[in-house]
Amino acid sequence: MDTIKSNKKALFALAIGGFGIGLTEFVIMGILTEVSGSLGITIPQAGHFIAAYALGVVVGAPLLTGLGSKLTPKKMLFLLMIWFTVFNTLSGLATGYTSLLFMRFLSGIPHGAFFGIGAVVATKLAKKGKGAQAISIMFSGLTVANVIGVPIGTYLGQQFSWSVSFYLVGFVGLLALGSIYLWMPKIEVDETEEKISVSQGLKNTELWALIALTTIGTGGFFAWYSYVAPLITDVAGLPNHFVGYAMMLAGLGMVVGNFLGAKMAELFSPLKAVIISLSVMCGILLLNMVIASNPYLLMILTFVIGAISFTVATPIQMAIINTSKGSEMLGSSMNQSAFNMGNASGAYLAGLPIAFGYGIIYSSLVGAMLAFSGVAIAVSILIVRRRKEIKYRKMAMSC
């Protein structure tokens, strides 16, 4: 009973860290207009801060996971959260485009390793057969951040200064540090497993296919979400404070979608669950283009898109862990890099039609195209798997 209670506290510690990460990753989208106005840059240029953070995740996830392979997960998670707290706080002190771009890059470096290592730790803390639920608890911190943290951070950034939003992130980082120190048990790492991860993990072709799936498929959501603020104000014509309400609705959707995705991963195979989610996302984003000028329907779809987007998170993480047996932490961390490559590419690609004067709603079209491409990759992986199974059966029968 004590073990179950302590494991729940440990999962809650991971959720607090996830809350801080979700806050810093998504609050920038709610204060994009304030940042661009303060620094004297365009909205597409301000979108570079989203991309810089995401690129930090891409660089940091495999690098820090490899460097920290000899440390216990508890020590590694603690060190990652120190880095996170320091550079997010310093982001609030940035005075220009270049300095904020650099700080956002550094702030993103611990993100992927934290979620990657945390996902594997969560499965070790979970009861047998409940790994997907444990991972969803960790990700719940990120989704709840979109319900509570991001709207508060957006409000503070709009009413006072965008710097205050990053100071709030630093405060949450301190809470995460304390919870990890007090509640996270010492889980030893199998050194043999880590050697396998270095020598063989990067040779796994299906792992790389899943990384591509995450990058491209989830880029569809980020293409829409990166420009949700101007979509609400410029296209739907709603007052500026409705951006906070919209992000809260998206966050509520993410909370629902996160746990729904865990159930889908248990009912179907993880990869089939991803195909269902991305297919629905493609259709909804196309619908969003049609109704974007209607403020009531747009707010409803904001919730729906948020929900659909996070039905992908746990299934794809489970698919990665299942595929990278013997190199779970590497694969799991690389998948977090992939999520943020999707963040960076989605924000960049969706900004192109805007920069060429086609309007904010075309970010949804870009998102639909990316989601559809993700479906195509997932189907291709299943076809290759089936062909391999047929080949192995024929070989077994011939023997």
Image: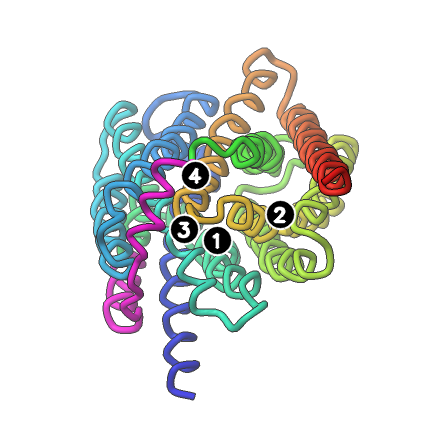
Residue farthest to the bottom, as pictured: 1
Q: Nearer the viewer, residue 165 or 396?
A: 396
Q: Quadrant of residue 391?
A: top right
The type of residue carrying mark 1 is Pro
Q: Secondary structure at mark 3?
A: helix
- Disc 2 from disc 3: Cα separation: 15 Å
Residue tagged 1: 151
- Disc 4 from disc 1: Cα separation: 29 Å
Residue tagged 4: 334
Q: Nearer the viewer, residue 96 or 98?
A: 98
| Of callouts 4 and 1, the N-terminal one | 1
User: At 61% across and 51% down in the image, what residue appears?
Assistant: 315
44 relative to 394 in the view: left or right? left
369 relative to 8 in the view: left or right? right
Q: Secondary structure at mark 1?
A: helix
| Of callouts 3 and 1, the N-terminal one | 3
User: At 46% across and 51% down in the image, what residue appears?
Assistant: 150
- Disc 1 from disc 2: Cα separation: 23 Å
Is 195 placed above or below 152 here? Answer: above
Which quadrant holds the N terminus?
bottom left
User: At 32% across and 26% down in the image, what residue appears?
Assistant: 39
